[in-house]
């Protein structure tokens, strides 16, 4: 690892980076910073520098690092009861399931840990619903997904990824998936057959570069699903829980999916918690022994997630995301045209697509790091911004100034 232009990498940072590089699989290519503590929107490196975190763990840190209320709940629970397995009931499980169901306006929850597991769970649920309720012939169920999707990293999920890095070289992949263009209701309609059981959709495609579908699209997907007897599965793992200025990104169009898939911020940035949430008409098809997870719904996860729901039910975080998001988008809209081609997103979530002639987004993120801002590229030409929802207005002002300066840097020395 070499230093960034203008920023000397300290010896301690250099050593930590090279040790990690020597002994970890190279499935990531992290920016050259080594963090050791964080509060709110600020993370401190072992170099003693404070960085403003505009990635927020891909929206897992919607409430900021070490949110005091969440840390208190987690610490208390950790000493009390951390794991029972689902072989035994624990005292927080009922509260958790009720809270998450209430947040989604649904009947029931199936808790898992990571986002990918929750997506897999939703796919299994939809297939079984297809066979038991819709009457699809055995092993013929089809699920429709979208070009540019990101739903996690399991074999089934990467099987329908259209990103070669994520997809290639891991086959054979499970059949039963069909991928159509995102945002094109005609393409979706053409792909639905009598064996289609579900449509798996991100209400905003995050990893693809914060792509917001055309107005009315989610509503049209909902109507098409209703008309054809197909389940609408909304992957709100990144878009949900306040990120876009509403509890769910589907709320912007008044759309209620059949199944919500939640993760990331549900664990408050402290523990992995994911969930599939649906009415009994769907959830009822899963019985004992037919799905599960050792850690899913554990007491620590339930304590934290129930507090997350309580925090979201105040509406405070959604409001912050709406108001500060409008401010962020206003600032980004003022960036020069030779720097930025387009800004997409909703609430405190933005995909900043660089103008042609700009260096790769990764280079801009390195320049941002040198200016004490943590951000991540989403594909070559887009920088994804998703600050914790506890960010302050002046911090956004400062961060966008750093971005503006990063766009006009003189060419990087080779
Ligand atoms: C992050 C993400 C996932 C996968 O979550 P993991 O916890 O990393 O498995 C799935 N879907 C979307 C939309 C995501 O952003």
Image: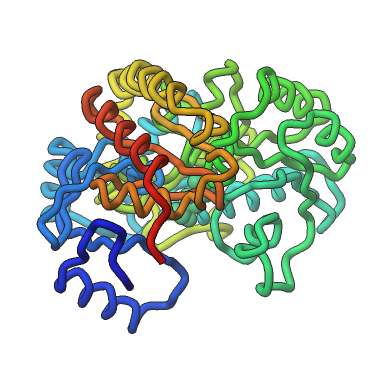
Whether 59 is drawn above or below 326: the answer is below
- 191 or 281: which is nearer to us? 191
Q: Quadrant of the N terminus?
A: bottom left
Residue at screen point 34% across, 50% down? 367
Residue sitting nearer the eye, 248 or 47: 47
**Residue located at (28% from left, 45% from top):** 373
Q: Can residue 92 be seen from the camera position used here?
A: no
Q: Residue at x 12, y 49 (%)?
A: 75
Q: Residue at x 76, y 29 (%)?
A: 225
Residue 206, percent from left and from top: 53, 41
Observer-nearest residue: 90 or 114?
114
Question: Residue 218 vs residue 98: left or right?
Answer: right
Q: Quadrant of residue 315?
A: top left
Residue 164 x, y percent position in the rendering: 67, 62
Which quadrant: the C terminus? bottom left
**Horizontal and vertical percent position of residue 394:** 21, 24
Using residue 155 as the reference point, say whether residue 383 is left or right of it.
Answer: left
- Give 64 or 361, whichever is nearer the viewer: 361
**Residue 364 in view, yes or no:** yes
| Number of numbered callouts drawn | 0
The colour scheme applied to this rendered structure is rainbow
Task: Check the image and name the residue furthest to the bottom.
Answer: 22
The x, y position of residue 56, in whole percent, is 33, 43
**On screen, 151 above or below 248?**
below
Q: Is residue 203 left or right of residue 44?
A: right
Q: Is residue 130 left or right of residue 366?
A: right
């Amino acid at each position: 690892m070499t230093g960034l232009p203008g920023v000397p990498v300290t010896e301690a940072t250099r050593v930590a980076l090279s040790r990690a590089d020597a002994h970890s699989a190279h499935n990531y290519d992290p920016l050259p910073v080594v963090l050791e503590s964080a509060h709110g929107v600020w993370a401190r490196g072992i170099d003693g520098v404070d960085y403003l975190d505009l990635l927020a763990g891909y929206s897992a840190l919607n409430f900021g690092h070490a949110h005091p209320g969440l840390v208190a709940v987690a610490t208390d629970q950790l000493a009390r009861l951390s794991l029972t397995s689902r072989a035994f009931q624990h005292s927080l499980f009922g509260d958790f399931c009720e809270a998450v169901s209430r947040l989604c306006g649904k009947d029931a929850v199936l808790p898992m840990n990571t986002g990918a597991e929750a997506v897999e769970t939703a796919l299994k649920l939809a297939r079984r619903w297809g066979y038991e309720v819709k009457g699809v012939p055995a092993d013929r169920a089809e699920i429709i997904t979208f070009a540019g999707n990101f739903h996690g990293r399991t074999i089934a999920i990467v099987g329908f990824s259209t990103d070669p890095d994520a997809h290639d070289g891991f086959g054979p992949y499970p059949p039963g998936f069909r991928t159509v263009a995102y945002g094109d209701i005609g393409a979706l309609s053409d792909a639905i057959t009598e064996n289609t059981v579900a449509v798996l959709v991100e209400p905003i495609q995050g990893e693809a570069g914060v792509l917001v579908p055309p107005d009315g699209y989610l509503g049209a997907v909902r109507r098409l699903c209703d008309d054809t007897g197909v389940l609408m599965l909304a992957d709100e793992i990144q878009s949900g829980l306040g990120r876009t200025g509403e509890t769910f990104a589907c709320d912007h169009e008044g759309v209620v999916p059949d199944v919500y898939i939640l993760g990331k911020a549900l664990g408050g940035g402290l523990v992995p918690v994911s969930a599939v949430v649906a009415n009994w008409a769907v959830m009822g098809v899963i019985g004992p022994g037919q799905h599960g997870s050792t850690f899913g719904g554990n007491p620590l996860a339930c304590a934290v997630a129930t507090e997350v729901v309580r925090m979201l039910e105040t509406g405070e975080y959604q409001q912050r995301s709406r108001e500060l998001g409008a401010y962020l988008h206003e600032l980004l809209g003022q960036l020069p045209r030779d720097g930025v081609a387009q800004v997409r997103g909703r609430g405190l979530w933005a995909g900043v697509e660089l103008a042609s002639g700009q260096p790769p987004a990764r280079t801009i993120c390195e320049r941002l790091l040198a200016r004490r801002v943590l951000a991540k590229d989403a594909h070559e030409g887009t920088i994804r911004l998703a600050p914790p929802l506890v960010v302050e207005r002046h911090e956004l002002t400062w961060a966008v100034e750093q971005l503006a300066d990063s766009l006009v840097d003189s060419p990087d020395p080779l």
